[in-house]
Amino acid sequence: MFNPDSCINFMPVRQYFRGQLLKHHLRDQWSRIVYHGKITRVNDMALYTRHSCATSHTNSEILMRIFLPPPAVMLFTIMHMIILNQYIPLVRFWEAHARWIGIPVIVLGLFISQWHAHLFKKLGTNINTFKDPDILTTDGLFRFSRNPMYLGFLITLTGVWIVQGSATPLLALLGFGLLTNYWYIPIEERAMLRKFGENYLSYKARVRRWL
C-alpha cells in the first residue's frame, strides 16, 4: 500500500512522467499512486494529503497550459458564438433594438477581469492557471467569489450572447462555463490546497466558488 510519507521516493517518477506524457504503463502506475493510497477519509484535507505526493501538473493540464489558457479559450468561444449566430441561429429571442443591453454587460465583465488581473500584478502573485500561486489573495471581489476573473469572463460572454440574441451561441457559452467549473477551477484549487493547506480550506469554507 502506498505510504504518503514516502512520496519523496517518487520524485524521479514524477520527472519522467512530465517528460513522457503518453507512456501507458507509467500512466497506470501513477493512477495507482494517486488514487489508491491509504487515505480513505473523503474530505478536503484527505484530498490535500493524497494529492500532495502527485505531480502539480497532470498529463491533460500540461497540454492545456500549452494550447488552452483561459483568455485564449474565451476568445475562441466568442468566435464560435459569432459563427453559430451567423449561420445557425435557430431562434431569435429578442429584436435588434433590445440587444444593446449586452454592451454594458460586456464592459462589466471585462472590467471585473481586468481589475483582478491588475490586482494580481500589484500584489506580485502569479496569474497563470497552470503555475503555483504565490499569495492567497482575498482582496477585491475575492472576498465574495473565489474566482472573480472567471466570473468576469462568463459575464463578458453573456453580454456577447445578449448582443447576438439567438439560441445557438448559448451552447458555446455553456461549454465555456462547464470547462471552467469542472477543469480550470479544480486545477487551481488543487494548487492552492497544496500551497496554502489549512488557510485555503478556511477561505474555501467562507467564500463560494462563484457567488
Image: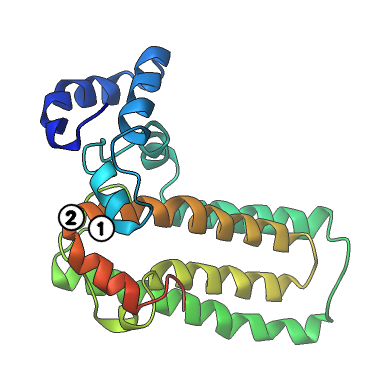
Residue found 22% across the figure and 26% down from its top: 14
Q: Is residue 110 left or right of residue 131?
A: right
Question: Label 2 belongs to which residue?
Answer: 195
Amino acid type, residue under disc 2 in the picture? Lys
User: In x, y percent, where is residue 112?
Assistant: 40, 78
Residue found 27% across the figure and 73% down from its top: 203
Query: Could you say which is closer to the camera, residue 138 or residue 105?
Result: 138
Q: Tally the numbered discs.
A: 2
Query: Could you say which is closer to the camera, residue 195 or residue 65?
Result: 195
Which image quarter is the N terminus in? top left
User: In x, y percent, where is residue 32?
Assistant: 36, 26
26 is higher (above) or lower (below) than 132: above
- Local SS, label 1: helix
User: In x, y percent, where is residue 20?
Assistant: 32, 18
Question: Label 1 belongs to which residue?
Answer: 192
Q: Is residue 163 left or right of residue 206?
A: right
Amino acid type, residue under disc 1 in the picture? Met
The reply to whether callout 1 and callout 2 are in contact (CB within 8 Å) is: yes
Distance, label 1 to label 2, CA atoms, is: 5 Å
User: In x, y percent, where is residue 207?
Assistant: 36, 77
128 is higher (above) or lower (below) than 201: above
Mark on residue 29? none
User: How would you rate the neighbour count of disc 2 (Cα within 10 Å): few for under 14, some for 14-19, many for 20 or more?
Assistant: some
